[in-house]
Image (cartoon, rainbow, N blue to C red):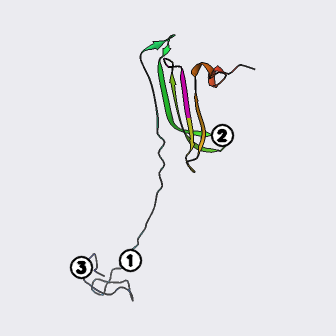
């Protein structure tokens, strides 16, 4: 080892004190690993209107699935011009496709805000 105080080279396996300057030279090494998870989401819509609503909307990203009690990747597209609703839900852990929907938007009723009130 080289003493950081006086630059004297010696073997510190027997005694951590530097034989030249008598200072203690104890080295400590710390290794740490940090896992960081980033959630990404996106959304958008067109400026063109169909019945006062955007002609095209899309949204995607990570959401908490209450049934699985973990995050899933959910994407959906609403196309009012072509009367289409598509949605895909994928488990982030197993990458298993949980739900896929591809149907006419006019048939996609009683979901989300359009649910009938009790």
Query: What x and y, as percent, mark residue 10?
Result: 29, 86
Query: What x and y, as percent, mark residue 40?
Result: 46, 39
Q: CA distance from mark 2 to mark 1?
A: 51 Å
Earlier along the polypeptide chain: callout 2 or callout 1?
1
Q: Nearer the viewer, residue 54 or 108?
A: 108
Start-end of magenta stretch: 81-87
Earlier along the polypeptide chain: callout 3 or callout 2?
3
Earlier along the polypeptide chain: callout 1 or callout 3?
3
Q: Image point 47% across, 21% down: which residue?
A: 56
Q: Residues within 10 Å of mark 2 (few under 14, many from 20)?
A: few
The C terminus sits in image quarter:
top right
Q: Residues within 10 Å of mark 1 (few under 14, many from 20)?
A: few
Q: Nearer the viewer, residue 30 or 76?
A: 76
Task: Check if residue 82 falls in the magenta segment.
Answer: yes
Q: Which residue is mark 2?
A: 66
Tell me the tag on residue 7.
3
Q: Image point 25% across, 83% down: which residue?
A: 8
Question: Label 3's element?
Answer: loop
Q: CA distance from mark 1 to mark 3?
A: 15 Å
Q: Which residue is mark 1?
A: 26
Q: Answer yes or no: do the residues labelled 2 and 1 have beta carbons within 8 Å?
A: no
From the viewer's perspective, tell me whether residue 35 is left or right of residue 3. right
Tag nearer the camera, 2 or 1:
2
Residue at the limit of the structure toward the top, as seen here: 51
Question: Label 1's element?
Answer: loop
Q: Is residue 38 above or below residue 49?
A: below
Q: Is residue 70 above or below residue 7?
A: above
Question: Label 2's element?
Answer: loop
């Amino acid at each position: 080892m080289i003493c950081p105080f006086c630059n004297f080279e010696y073997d510190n396996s027997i005694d951590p004190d530097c034989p030249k300057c008598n200072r203690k030279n104890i080295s400590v090494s710390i290794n740490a690993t940090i896992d960081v998870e980033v959630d990404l989401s996106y959304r958008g819509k067109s400026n063109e209107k169909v019945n006062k609503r955007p002609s095209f909307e899309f949204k995607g990203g990570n959401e908490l699935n209450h049934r699985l009690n973990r995050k899933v990747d959910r994407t959906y597209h609403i196309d009012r011009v072509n009367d289409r609703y598509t949605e895909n839900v994928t488990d982030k852990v197993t990458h298993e496709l949980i739900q896929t929907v591809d149907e006419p938007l006019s048939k996609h009723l009683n979901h989300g805000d359009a649910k009938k009130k009790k």
